[in-house]
Amino acid sequence: MSAMYGPWRGGRSFDLGRMTLRELVVAYAAHPAIHLYAVLAVVSTVLAVLWGEGAGFRPLLAVLATALAYPLAWYLIHRFVLHSRFLYRSPLTAALWKRIHFDHHQDPHRLDVLFGAPVTTLPTILAILIPLGWFVGGGRAGAAAAVAAGLVITCIYEFCHCIQHLNFKPRSRLLRRMKELHLAHHFHHEGGNFGITSYLIDRGFGTYYAEARERPRSPHAFNLGYDRAEAERFPWVARLTGAPPRDRPARPGEKA
């Protein structure tokens, strides 16, 4: 067990800009969060089957509803929570915001901060999908089926997110396009292209942009608005980081 999780527990920082696809697959497959999601997905699936006797196809409707709702839920959380400014303005939530999104934008290639922390992802998944699955799927079997589907989709999202930051050009035209749009969000203008695997919600909310030239370069793509002036007013994130916020990528040899 210690050998399996050793690199992650040792605080190693994986640089997606220097990793191969094979190295990513190995690191991804060894991540404790992915193992946790997989185990819980299996448990939820078993419960859905055990509780689903006589429920017919309703638990499958919960799975379908989860797949349809997931892109919208991700968009709303990403845009209105992760990119909001109220979290860093309170000492009670500054550390949370730093971990779940600020660190990722400060250095988009760090694999160790790309993965969501289960302490935040799991409560969110359960809070959204248990009521949705219960309502659509006809009770506890539907709730379990929705949670199982949500955990599987989370694993897929996490891997796609990794690919988007990996120094690798996907063969799939669809994956290449997803990567281009996501990298524009990180390196050009953070106020758009909030999706990961789908940008239909961005189109619906008017935050989609197909080319960088469609928007001016944002000064906050790396600091999410938490610049040096904000750090002076709300110092908690900067204190945790140990350095002023950056407004550009780290140069070669520069401490992240």
Image (tube, rainbow, N blue to C red):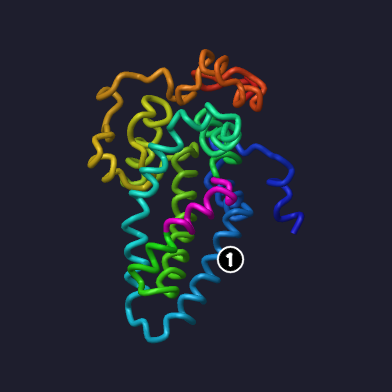
Q: Is residue 84 above or below residue 131?
A: above
Q: Which residues are magenta?
A: 116-128
Task: Please name the amino acid that badge 1 sits on.
Answer: Val
Q: Is residue 71 left or right of residue 225?
A: left
Instruction: Tell me the SS state at disc 1.
Output: helix
State which quarter of the image contains the N terminus. bottom right
- The location of residue 149, given as percent across then percent down, is 43, 64
Q: Residue at x 27, y 29 (%)?
A: 211
User: Disc 1 marks which residue?
Assistant: 39
**172 or 155: which is nearer to us?**
155
Q: Is residue 187 above or below residue 59?
A: above
Quadrant of the rendered structure where residue 183 is? top left
- Sort mark 1 into few (<14), some (14-19) or many (20+) by Cα contacts within 10 Å: some
Quadrant of the rendered structure where residue 164 is? top left
Q: Residue at x 55, y 37 (%)?
A: 16
Residue closest to the far right: 2
**9 or 86: which is nearer to us?**
86
Q: Residue at x 28, y 40 (%)?
A: 202
- The location of residue 88, given as percent across then percent down, is 53, 29
Residue closest to the far bottom: 54
Q: Is residue 90 above or below residue 152?
A: above
Q: Is residue 205 left or right of residue 117?
A: left
Q: Is residue 232 left or right of residue 225?
A: right
Q: How many marks?
A: 1
